[in-house]
Amino acid sequence: MAIFTRTTKNLILKIDEFFDNIDLGLLVFREGIKAYLAGDTEAFGRHIQKVELLENNADRLQRSIENEMITHSILPQHRGEVSSLIDLLDEIIDTIKASLTEFSIESPDIPASLHHHFISITEASVSAGEELIPAARAFFKSPHTVREKLLKVYYFESETDKVIKNAIKIIFHDMKELDLAHKAHLRYVIHHIGNISDNAQKAADMLSIMAIKIVM
C-alpha cells in the first residue's frame, strides 16, 4: 500500500525529482572519473559543472520537500524518518561533488597500471548508490518490496570494500617505485570514492527499518 494519496501528488513529484538528481549525479560521477583517468580535462570539467548543478538542485528540492511536509502536515508520524532518509541521500550527491572537486584541485597522479583498479572501485561504489534509488522510490509506493531491493546495495557495498582493499594492498606492497606520500594520497582518493557506497549503506540501513515499520 502506498503511503501517499492523490492529495500529496506535488510532494511525490518533488521526491521523485530529488531521486532523479541523485541518480544522475552517480552517472556523471562514473563518467567524470573515466574522463580524468583518460586525461580528458575538458570532459572532466563538464562533469564537475553537471554535478554542481545537480547538487544545487538536490539541496533546493530537499528544503522544499521538508517545508511542504511541515506546512501541510504530511506524514506527521513518518516525517522525521523521511527527512533523515532525504538527508542521507543528499550526502551521496555531496560526496560525489566533494570527490570530483578533490580530483580537480589535487590532481592525483594515478599510475596507468592502477587505472583499471580505480574504475573497478568507482563502478562498485556507484552501483551501490544506483541500487539504492529504486528501493527508496519503492518505499513511497510499495514499501513491502523495499527489503528485497536493498540486497544489491549491500552486495555492491561489500564488493567496494573488497576492491579497495585489493588496490591499497597493491599500492603499498607492490609499487616500490612510489614514495610514501604518493601512496598515502592514492589511498586517500580511493577512500573518498568508496564513501559513496558507505553512504548508500547507511541510507539502506535506515530504509530497511522504515520499511519494516510501515508494513507492520
Image: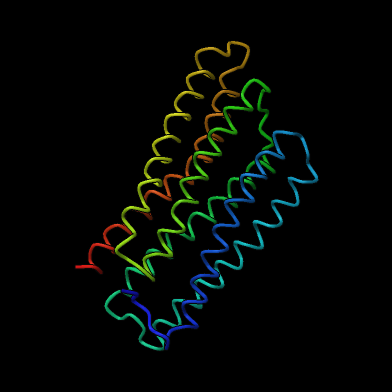
The image quarter in which residue 147 lies: bottom left
124 versus 65 height, above or below: above
Report the residue at 53% width, 51% height from top: 95
Where 176 falls versus 180 (above or below)?
Answer: above
Q: Residue at x 56, y 38 (%)?
A: 122
Q: Measuring 49% from the left and 46% from the top, which residue is drawn there?
A: 196
Q: Is residue 8 left or right of residue 36?
A: left
Camera-nearest residue between 135 and 108: 135
Asked if 3 appears above or below 19 in the picture, the reply is below
What's the image's color scheme?
Answer: rainbow
The one nearer the camera, 148 or 79, is: 148
- In this view, the residue farthest toward the right is 42
Left or right of residue 196: residue 50: right
Q: How far across and how far down the image is residue 74, in percent? A: 36, 83
Name the one closer to the observer, 141 or 59.
141
Q: Residue at x 56, y 72 (%)?
A: 60
Question: Quarter holding the N terminus?
Answer: bottom left
Position in image of residue 39 (x %, y %): 76, 34
User: In the figure, is residue 100 to the left or right of 192?
Assistant: right
x, y percent for residue 162: 42, 29
Number of numbered markers: 0
Residue 79 x %, y %: 33, 75
Task: Name the outermost residue toward the left.
Answer: 216
Q: Quadrant of the C terminus?
A: bottom left
Q: Is residue 205 left or right of residue 56?
A: left
